[in-house]
Amino acid sequence: MSNETKTHPSAKAPQKTVLNLGNLPPKLKPSDMKQSASQYPRTPSRVNPNQPPWPAYRGYHEYSFAHATMGVRLPTILGKAIDDVWKTLNQEYDEERIVDLVNCIHRLEDLMGDLQGNSKLRPIIDDGAGDVALWNKEIAKFFRGKDFMNAPWLFAEAYKYRRLRECFSLSKYWIDYDVFFRQKCDTFSRSNQAVFELSQRFAEPHKHEGNISAEAQLEKNKLLFLELTQVCLWGNSTDLSLLIDMTEEDIKKLQSTGGDHLAATEKNILGNDLHKLADYVMTIKNGRIDFVLDNAGFELYCDLVYADWLIQSGTCSQVIFHGKKIPWFVSDVTKKDWDWILNSCVYGQLFQDASDAEVESLRTLGHRWKQYEKEGKWKYEAHPFWCTGYTFWDLHSEAPDLFQHLSESDLVIFKGDLNHRKLTYDCHAPLDTPFNQAIGPLASEAGAPPVASLRTIKSDVVVGIPSGVGEKLDDEEPGWKISGKYAVVLLSQGRKGETPVYNN
């Protein structure tokens, strides 16, 4: 018999998922949007999770990426998750733990059935987690009777990942099991070329040159910041939930960090506040910058290189990283992923053909980063709000403690596609909608911090790009919104310094 682990039948997503669509509303077409444009955006009093400022993307919209996600991508991802659990079970020997894990698999299979059958969104079972009441309040208030395909795509997708968590949180031994951990580790271990290109450039501490003027040093810092920001931006191209099957060569192409490549890719930043962001960051001295993280693995590694430079350059005295409390949207960063990458840099042997110099450069970075953590210069935090179905329009009202915390930051950088969707309510906003308008309260509320979104475009919602650009791409490159070829770097100045006001 082959030693290769067989894929269990329950792990396989069907070739074509047949969905029971039931009595859905009429299909919405892009042309319908133009005809009803005068109705939008909705006034703030009419906005809620089921009624965003502009119409929501929903799974039954066949022209949208939401349809492909709900019908094909999510069952495929769930199938791979079930396969991962069977691999783990096959390595267990304790019967009680095995039986407990088999029950997790049964719950996963039930979730697969609900997803493929387009079931109604039931309440989350009380598994003792602190977010159950928040989830069930939102379901009862806004999504009673909704199913996977006619609920807003953003909520339905988030709900699927919370249900995935429930499959393990109801167990005795597997509460913290991450079905995506193996994938995340594997992707980073296949990123050796880009990993060492960065480690060898940034292992040596950043030095302020005494023989050049302050103006020249500032310009040098600005150029380096621009380059690192692009590295951080395009590092987001490695998104496991979107790139389900990739060759090693595909990964290397996406992760190229060479300067020539970056110069060529800046033209693909359609909404480009990159230089405005650089000018603002150059005014920060010994400040605090927050990262709302996206993907683990190589993207997190790029974020750490970026944050390292922010500390060394004197821009920041503290960087706070916001991750997820539970496995989320396949590749999002959890505390386990954070600890794994720091320890892998220091102790790991992930890259078989690496030279001694390459390994040493990575060890040097890892030791320095762990020291930052010990000294409190770097902090990892995971507020429960990041793993709810709410968008960031509701951050001020549903998580006032988190809003207050962020309001004390000099800049909050939101990484990646999901965070951008949550910032903008994931709705049919016109392509040239100003970023400040699209993110609502995170720009307009008193105390709102400066906010930057670094996002490679991988789903339908796009804002903050010049008029005519998106329409031209619609004609010339119909798949441009999901290709990952284009990006936005958008900045909101916020209302920092003003005292936040909360409704009692």
Image (cartoon, grey):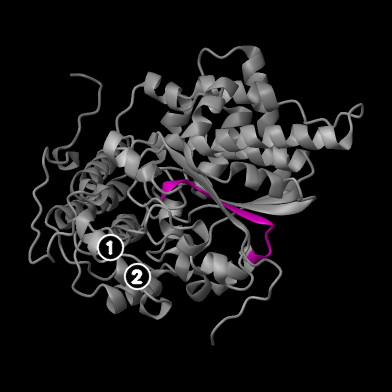
Compared across the picture, whether 336 is left or right of 51 comes to right
Q: Give x and y (percent) for residue 41.
A: 37, 69
**Residue, disc 2:** 49
Q: Residue furthest bottom?
A: 504
Residues rendered magenta in the picture: 407-417
Q: Dot 2: within a 10 Å radius of its alpha carbon, few (fewer than 14), some, or many (20 or more) residues?
A: many
Q: Quadrant of the C terminus?
A: bottom right
Percent x, y for residue 94? 32, 44
Q: Is residue 147 above or below residue 145?
A: above
Q: Residue at x 30, y 56 (%)?
A: 157
Does the rendering let one see residue 110?
yes
Measuring from the top left, give residue 248's x and y in whole percent: 39, 21
User: What amino acid type is highlighted by mark number 2?
Assistant: Pro
Q: Is residue 413 magenta?
A: yes
Q: Are marks 2 and 1 in contact (CB under 8 Å)?
A: yes
Residue occupying the far front of the picture: 468
Compared with residue 46, is residue 238 higher up or lower down, i.e. above or below?
above
Left or right placement of residue 144 versus residue 44 in this view: left
Q: Earlier in the sequence, mark 2 or mark 1?
A: 2
- Decide if residue 297 is in sight here: no
Q: Is residue 408 magenta?
A: yes
Dot 1 lies on which element? loop
Marks 2/1: CA distance? 8 Å
Q: Amino acid at mark 1?
A: Pro
Residue 152, numbered circle: 1
Tell me what residue is drawn at x 37 percent, y 64 percent.
389
